[in-house]
Image: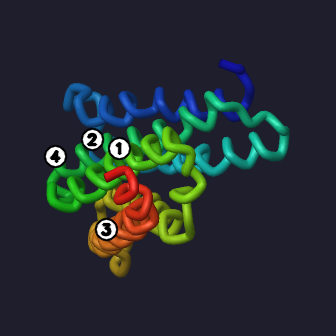
Amino acid sequence: MPLNVPNLLTWLRVIAIPLLLALYYVPAGWMTMHERNLAATVLFTAAAITDWLDGYLARRLNQQSAFGAFLDPVADKLMVAAALMLLVELDRTNAFVAAIIVGREIAISALREWMAKVGEAKSVAVNFLGKLKTTFQMIAIPLLLYGEPIGAWFDPQRVGTWLIYLAAALTLASMVYYLKLASPRAFREG
C-alpha cells in the first residue's frame, strides 16, 4: 500500500466515520445538540471535500494506485452508509430512503466486481448519472445533519429531505442503467 497524500486523505475519511457517529453518543453534558449537528456537518462536509481532493491529487501528482482505486469508493460508501444510519436514528430521514441508497451501493459494487472478473469492468464504469446521484447525496446529507433552521427563511431539513429523495430516485435510475449495461453479459453467462 503506497502511503501518499491521496491515500492519506482517503484513510482520514475512513477515520472520520467513527468520529461522526461518536458525536451523537458522547455524554449529554459534553455537547449541545446544536454543537453536535454543527460538528457533524463540518466533519461530513470535510470528508466529502477530501473525496474530490484525493482523486484530483492522485491524478495531478501522478500518485494513482490500485490500492487507492480500491479504498476510495469503499471509504465513500462507508461514510454515506454511516451518515444515513445516523440520520435514520435521528429521525431526519426514513429507513426506506437509506435502504435504497445503501442497497444500490452494495448491488452495484458487487456488479462491478463481477464485471471486472469477467473482463468487462469498463462497461459499468462510473457515469454522469452516478456522479449526479453522488452530488445530491453529498449536499443532502450535511443539510440533514445540520437540520436546524438558519434564520427565518432557510430550512436545511426541508431542503435536505427533498435532495435525499431526489438522490434516492437517481440511485434507482442509475442502478437500472448499470444493470442494463451488464445484462448482455449476464445472459451470455446464463
In the image, residue 1 above or below residue 126:
above
Q: Is residue 156 visible?
A: no
Residue 145, image x, y percentages: 33, 53
Q: Which residue is mark 1?
A: 35
Q: Secondary structure at mark 2?
A: loop
Left or right: residue 126 versus residue 133 is: right
Q: Nearer the viewer, residue 171 or 124?
A: 124
Give the mark, 4 or 1, whose residue is nearer the N terminus.
1
Placement of the N terminus among the 4 image quadrants? top right
Q: Look at 36% across and 81% down and name the residue there.
A: 153
Q: Which residue is mark 3?
A: 172
Residue 141, image x, y percentages: 37, 57
CB contact under 8 Å: marks 4 and 1 = no
In the image, residue 110 above or below residue 176:
above
Q: Give me the C-alpha separation between circle 2 and circle 3.
A: 37 Å
Q: Secondary structure at mark 1?
A: helix
Left or right: residue 166 versus residue 117 is: left
Q: Give me the C-alpha separation between circle 4 and circle 1.
A: 18 Å
Q: Nearer the viewer, residue 16 or 72?
A: 72
Instruction: Identify residue type, mark 2.
Output: Thr
In the image, residue 135 above or below residue 62:
below
CB contact under 8 Å: marks 2 and 1 = yes
Q: Which residue is mark 2?
A: 32
Q: Secondary structure at mark 3?
A: helix
Give the mark, 3 or 1, whose residue is nearer the N terminus.
1
Give the mark, 4 or 3, whose residue is nearer the N terminus.
4
Q: Give me the C-alpha separation between circle 2 and circle 1.
A: 5 Å
Residue 59, image x, y percentages: 78, 45
Task: Tally the marks.
Answer: 4
Q: Which residue is mark 4?
A: 89
